[in-house]
Image (spheres, helix red, strand yellow):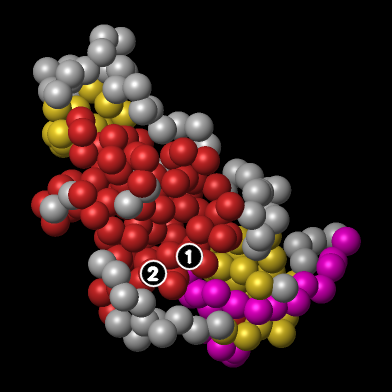
Amino acid sequence: MQGFILHTQKVKDEDLIVYILSPKMLIKAYRFYGLRHSSILSGYKIDFALEENPSFLPRLKDVLHLGFLWIMQREKMLLWQEFIRLLYKHLKEVEELDDFYFKLLEECVKRFEKQNPKRVIVDAYLKILEFEGRLHKEFICFACDEKIQNHITLVRAFLPSHSYCALGFEFAQERLMQFYTSKNCAVFNDEEIHNLYHLIKEGL
């Protein structure tokens, strides 16, 4: 079985509760003597087995790290773990999941090798919004329900608004439409990517 570690929680000295995103569910497992084995860190992809325990959480065992080519690149790893933390907060109340999230992380891992990680995360977040039915393509202001013309101000979750209705970051409507259609943020300059990433950090 394979999965991405979304979160770890220390319990009883060296033991850990580990939250793992598998293709079909968010697994909550117990790992005994965590410090005596290989490191378990958020963002890592692992191959593992579960030993069922009818009275408690399944036990995580036979853990094998499935490394990324960029895993030793500090800046990329920090951004990756930041995204993983946001994803955990977003999914932590869910048990059964569509394989969309697992496949999305696999895609991100590959793209991190050669692309700007913030751009990869911006594209990934757009796909999450669309998959969950939360992407607002009509550009109706969430605050006043009126149509927005020309420039769009985005706030958390890429909600569109007029510049005078909410504080956010302004984007040209045409370029936003290109982004929403292609799911590729190449249309934006680095400052715009920084602004989009700032919105993502506010929460998925």
How far from the left and from the top, in percent, is residue 136?
A: 38, 28
Kind of residue sitting beneath label 2: Arg
Helix, strand or loop for disc 1: helix
Q: Which residue is mark 1?
A: 107
What whole-number distance in Å separates the C-alpha atoms at marks 2 and 1? 6 Å
Residue at 66% in and 72% down: 2
As drawn, 112 above or below 132: below
Q: Which residue is mark 2?
A: 111
Report whether 128 appears left or right of 31: left
Residue at 30% in and 82% down: 73
As drawn, 85 above or below 176: below
Residue at 66% in and 49% down: 97
As drawn, 45 above or below 103: below
Kind of residue sitting beneath label 1: Glu
The answer to whether residue 95 is magenta is: no
How far from the left and from the top, in percent, is residue 140?
A: 30, 17
The answer to whether residue 50 is magenta is: yes
| Labelled disc at residue 179 | none
Residues 108 and 67: in front is: 108
* Dots 2, 1 in contact, CB < 8 A: yes
Please say whether residue 27 is visible from this viewpoint.
yes
Report whether 177 appears left or right of 29: left
Helix, strand or loop for disc 2: helix
Please say whether residue 202 is visible from this viewpoint.
no
Which region shows up in magenta?
A: 35-54
